[in-house]
Amino acid sequence: MDEWLNDDMMHTRANTGEHWQVYNTGPSISRSKNKLVQFLATVLRDIQGHASSYHFPLTEDNKVTGQRLMALLESQDGEEECVEGLHEFYFSLCGMVTEDLCQK
């Protein structure tokens, strides 16, 4: 599916590809973004250790990329490195490690 964002509108073309449909994303994208940030922060807290008896079933790769992201966020490195670390962590959680991420 092809899609692109423009302010508060998301334009999507179904796999049939002939017509674009416009969806008002409004607060929906913002709510989704906030939930994603909360989830990632919760997983990072789990990696750091916490008092809860529940722990996410993380792979060693998930833990390593999470620790790398925390180090980047705590360092004085630039925003680009932090964004790359965030993407690497997110994709490791999704099980979607790409060749580009493996090379980094």
Image (spheres, rainbow, N blue to C red):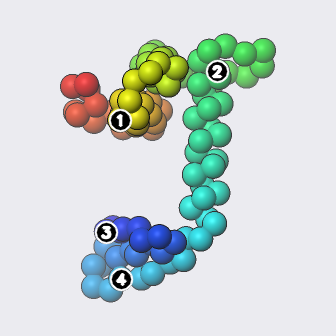
Mark 4: secondary structure: strand
Q: Considering the image in quadrants, where does the N terminus appear?
A: bottom left
Mark 1: secondary structure: helix
Question: Of the residues under marks 2 and 1, which one precedes in the sequence?
Answer: 2
* Camera-side mark, 1 or 3: 1
Q: Position of residue 37 (x, y in %)?
A: 59, 41
Label 4 Cα neighbours within 10 Å, binned few <14 / some 14-19 / many ≥20: few
The number of discs equals: 4
Mark seen at residue 46: 2
Q: Amino acid at mark 1?
A: Glu
* Camera-side mark, 4 or 1: 1
Question: Residue drawn 32% across and 86% down?
Answer: 19
Q: Considering the image in quadrants, where does the C terminus appear?
A: top left
Look at the image and tell me whether residue 95 can be seen.
Answer: no
Question: Of the residues under marks 2 and 4, which one precedes in the sequence?
Answer: 4
Is residue 30 placed above or below 21 in the rendered structure? above
Which residue in the structure is indicated by mark 4? 20
Between residues 54 and 45, which one lies in front from this camera angle? 45
Label 4 and label 1: CA atoms lie apart by 33 Å
Is residue 14 placed above or below 29 in the rendered structure? below
Q: Quadrant of residue 49?
A: top right
Label 2 and label 4: CA atoms lie apart by 42 Å
Question: Of the residues under marks 4 and 1, which one precedes in the sequence?
Answer: 4
Which residue in the structure is indicated by mark 3? 2
Mark 3: secondary structure: strand
Q: Do callouts 2 and 4 mark residues in contact (Cβ within 8 Å)?
A: no
Left/right placement of residue 55 relative to residue 88 reads right
Question: Residue drawn 35% across and 35% down?
Answer: 80
